[in-house]
Image: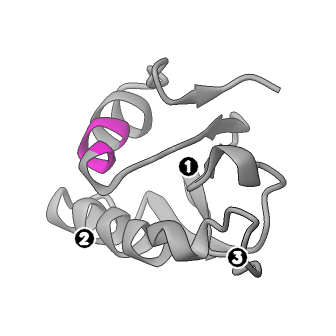
Amino acid sequence: MKFKKHVFICTNQKDAPKKSCGTEHGLALVEAFKQELTQRGLQRDIRAQRAGCLDACAFGPALVVYPEGTYYGNVQPADVAEIVESHLVNDQPVERLKLDF
């Protein structure tokens, strides 16, 4: 099965005092993306899944969207619908959350 877009959400756990996407609701983001994609009937074209470290810990919770390779940081569950609508459906990255490395 080939997906048009793939969202990898960091759920990595690190020991304190380091910031950790997993403890910053990374798993909640995975579930929120899956739920939003399913509600919109997009789960066959777009996949959201958990990932290990994306090397963006200071900006976490972080995720990356492929095939573009667009990184997002400090993503909150309330941002999921906007990312799905703007970026995943309409190919317009959400600039306020985008990370430029």
Q: Earlier in the sequence, mark 3 or mark 1?
A: 1
Q: Are marks 2 and 1 in contact (CB under 8 Å)?
A: no
Residue count near mark 1 (Cα–Cα under 10 Å), binned few <14, some 14–19, many ≥20: some
Q: Nearer the viewer, residue 35 or 75?
A: 75
Q: Which residue is mark 3?
A: 12
Q: Nearer the viewer, residue 8 or 19?
A: 19
Q: Who's the residue at 49% across and 18% down the image?
A: 95
Q: Position of residue 28 (x, y in %)?
A: 37, 74
Which label belongs to residue 5?
1
Amino acid type for the residue under numbered disc 1: Lys
Q: Are marks 2 and 3 in contact (CB under 8 Å)?
A: no
Which label belongs to residue 35?
2
Quadrant in which residue 35 is drawn:
bottom left
Horizontal side of 65 relative to 55 (left or right) equals left
Q: Nearer the viewer, residue 85 or 99?
A: 99
Q: Secondary structure at mark 3?
A: loop
Magenta residues (range): 79-83
Q: Secondary structure at mark 1?
A: strand
Where the N terminus falls, by quadrant? bottom right
Residue count near mark 2 (Cα–Cα under 10 Å), binned few <14, some 14–19, many ≥20: some
**Magenta segment: does it hold 81?**
yes
Report the mark closest to the observer, 2 or 1.
2
Q: Earlier in the sequence, mark 2 or mark 1?
A: 1
Amino acid type for the residue under numbered disc 2: Gln
Horizontal side of 69 relative to 38 (left or right) equals right
Which label belongs to residue 61?
none
Q: Secondary structure at mark 2?
A: helix
Report the mark closest to the observer, 2 or 3.
3
Horizontal side of 27 relative to 14 (left or right) equals left
Q: Is residue 71 above or below residue 30?
A: above
Amino acid type for the residue under numbered disc 3: Asn
